[in-house]
């Protein structure tokens, strides 16, 4: 497959759209509450939904199914641990939604997710 900048940007854009869908309408309040507790089923389900979305995007791009499954698994594992870490830092520090540090942690969490997508694209398209 010929890699073009347009393809890479489209791949990342679709992963970002997937992220909005998985962190928005597909995430329940129960999932949010579970993310602070390691290996709770609903926290794992949330990360699994992200991995499933990444799998759909990767397969839609015609990536090798084994590779698609691998990057989907990496996305789910990284997503889970970023969320878990953020939720625990926020809880430990007692930050609330009306405080700046809460939003700094939230935006850092989101940036880490999007940087993960850049890395997945970099590895998937063997960029220099």
Image (spheres, grey):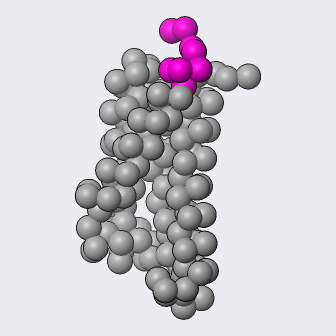
Query: In the figure, is residue 92 to the left or right of 128?
Result: left
Is 19 magenta? The answer is no
What residue range appears in magenta? 1-8
The residue shown at (29%, 62%) is 27
The residue shown at (49%, 86%) is 98
Q: Quadrant of residue 69?
A: top left
State the image coordinates of residue 25 (x, y, percent, origin top left).
26, 58
Query: In the figure, is residue 106 to the left or right of 19?
Result: right
- The C terminus appears in which quarter of the rendering? top right
State the image coordinates of residue 112 (x, y, percent, origin top left).
59, 55
Determine the residue located farthest toward the right in the rendered image. 128
The residue shown at (53%, 52%) is 113
- Of 76 and 128, the residue lying toward us: 128
Residue 4 shows in the view: yes
Q: Is residue 62 above or below residue 108?
A: above
Determine the residue located farthest toward the bottom in the rendered image. 94
Q: Quadrant of residue 18?
A: top left
State the image coordinates of residue 78 (x, y, percent, origin top left).
53, 53
């Amino acid at each position: 497959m010929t890699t073009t900048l347009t393809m890479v940007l489209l791949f990342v854009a679709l992963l970002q759209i997937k992220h909005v869908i998985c962190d928005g309408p597909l995430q329940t309040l129960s999932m949010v509450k579970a993310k602070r507790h390691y290996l709770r089923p609903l926290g794992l389900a949330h990360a699994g939904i992200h991995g499933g979305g990444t799998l759909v995007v990767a397969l839609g791009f015609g990536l090798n199914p084994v590779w698609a499954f691998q990057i989907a698994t990496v996305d789910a594992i990284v997503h889970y641990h970023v969320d878990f870490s953020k939720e625990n830092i926020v809880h430990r520090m007692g930050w609330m939604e009306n405080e700046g540090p809460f939003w700094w942690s939230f935006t850092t969490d989101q940036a880490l997710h999007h940087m993960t997508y850049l890395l997945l694209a970099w590895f998937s398209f063997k960029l220099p």
